[in-house]
């Protein structure tokens, strides 16, 4: 099925978080009905969608019924089980293809894939046991970072090794889970590229964002990041090769380490809209959420060129209690995700500060 969806069609979204919420809002503006599939009650996405199916991801009968009831299925969460996405694909096109989930869910598979498709990553070795970790430290050296292969996000499931003696403590810190040991990247800065591929194979990308993390959590993104032509072209080439290798339809986030000597290392990919692309909501005529909806609907991609520079500030945990201050801040646009409870480290919203000429 390759015909573009018509306004009024139903777009199924696996996942009920803030990314699903912003996708549902973008879908609604284009006349689509968004249907959320989420295991949690009262999800941020479900409250702005026209319908929610509340069921476990492992409930494949519920997944199949959901897929039958929509025209296309997409996802906002990279840990949707691959079997869930494949069950949905029996009844509706799933975009991006579930193989993007398969690659992105396992850091070992992901890094091997990235090195085979246009990118270079830090050196890495898989370690399923403490003995394997000790052997990995011999080749990778220190400083290095141990990361669980699966389910890590916002810096969770990671431990730094400053010397080979740290191996045991690091392995314990990640709960003895199957992991990879990564060489420490001495990057000058972190950037990301948010790119999209349409059903017809067209690739477009937003300009690079410059990202700042604290304690493994994204705090700020500023875009367009200053970058020479070579860096910009290299980032676009990496993103394009990844998208093509996955026969990808939709928006992808590619996190990059800029080593400063014109060399970019790929850190990881997110097979979905990405936090470092939230600035596009107030600085581009077609933001990353509309871009994703356009792609999965089989529509032509929109213009990713920003009309103004912008800076996105994440509101994490208690930051969100300060929401009122942003209402009088020049150039600021407040976005809150409707999460019922403030928790430490939880992404509650963001603010875009748009630079006006
Ligand atoms: P997550 O899935 O939690 O986003 P990342 O692998 O992106 O995990 O790690 C979070 C942050 O930790 C990165 O954005 C970067 O700042 C830092 N980091 C991760 N891996 C490395 C590395 N190999 N070398 C240096 N810093 C790293
Ligand atoms: Mg990351």
Image (cartoon, rainbow, N blue to C red):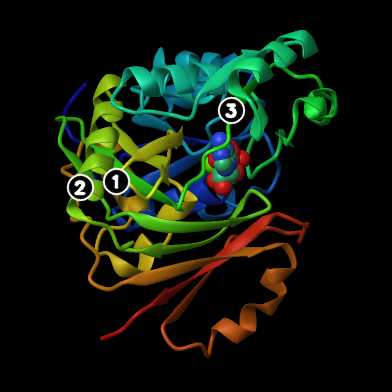
Callout 1: few (<14), some (14-19), or many (20+) C-alpha neighbours within 10 Å?
Answer: few
Are the residues flagged by discs 2 and 1 in contact, CB closer than 8 Å? yes
Q: Is mark 3 within 8 Å of ligand 1?
A: yes
Is residue 260 shown left or right of residue 348? left
Of the two numbered discs 2 and 1 in the rendering, the one whose residue sits closer to the viewer: 1
Label 2 belongs to which residue?
A: 230
Tell me, yes or no, if residue 69 can be seen here. Answer: yes
Say what secondary structure mark 1 lies in: loop
Task: Specify which label sits upstream in the sequence, 3 or 2.
Answer: 3
Numbered mark located on residue 262 in the image: 1
Which residue is at a point 74% across and 15% down the rendered structure image?
134
- Quadrant of the rendered structure where residue 256 is? top left
User: Does 249 sit above or below residue 333?
Assistant: above
Which residue is at a point 49% across and 26% down the rendered structure image?
104
User: Which quadrant is the N terminus positioned in?
Assistant: top left
Is residue 279 shown left or right of residue 109? left
Indicate the position of residue 233 as horizontal and vertical percent values: 20, 44
Numbered mark located on residue 182 in the image: 3
């Amino acid at each position: 099925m390759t015909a573009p969806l018509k306004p009024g069609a139903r777009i199924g979204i696996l996942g009920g978080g803030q990314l699903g919420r912003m996708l549902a809002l973008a879908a609604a503006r284009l006349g689509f009905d968004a249907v959320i599939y989420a295991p949690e009650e009262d999800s941020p996405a479900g409250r702005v969608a026209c319908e929610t199916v509340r069921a476990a991801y492992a409930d494949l009968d519920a997944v199949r019924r959901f897929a039958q009831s929509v025209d296309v299925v997409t996802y906002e969460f990279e840990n949707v089980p691959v079997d869930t996405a494949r069950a949905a694909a029996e009844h509706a096109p799933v975009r991006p293809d579930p193989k993007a989930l398969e690659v992105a869910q396992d850091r070992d598979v992901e890094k091997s894939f990235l090195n085979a498709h246009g990118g270079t990553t830090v050196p890495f070795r898989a370690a399923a046991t403490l003995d394997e970790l000790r052997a990995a430290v011999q080749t990778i050296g220190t400083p290095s970072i141990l990361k669980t292969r699966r389910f890590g996000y916002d810096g969770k499931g990671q431990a730094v090794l400053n010397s080979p003696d740290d191996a045991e403590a690091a392995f314990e810190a990640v709960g003895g889970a199957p992991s990879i040991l990564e060489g420490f990247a001495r990057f000058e800065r972190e950037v990301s590229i948010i790119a999209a591929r349409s059903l017809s194979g067209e690739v477009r990308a937003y300009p690079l964002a410059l990202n700042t993390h604290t304690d493994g959590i994204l705090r700020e993104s500023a875009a367009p990041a200053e970058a020479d032509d070579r860096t910009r072209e290299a980032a676009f080439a990496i993103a394009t090769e990844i998208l093509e290798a996955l026969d990808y339809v939709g928006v992808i986030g590619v996190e990059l380490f800029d080593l400063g000597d014109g060399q970019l290392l790929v850190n990881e990919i997110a097979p979905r809209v990405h936090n470092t692309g939230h600035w596009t909501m107030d600085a581009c005529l077609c933001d990353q959420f509309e871009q994703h909806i356009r792609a999965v609907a089989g529509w032509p991609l929109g213009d990713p060129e920003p009309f103004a520079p912008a800076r996105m500030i994440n509101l994490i945990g208690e930051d969100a209690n300060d929401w009122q201050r942003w209402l009088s801040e020049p150039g600021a646009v407040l976005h809150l995700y409707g999460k019922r409870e403030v928790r430490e480290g939880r992404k509650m919203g963001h603010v875009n500060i748009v630079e006006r000429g």
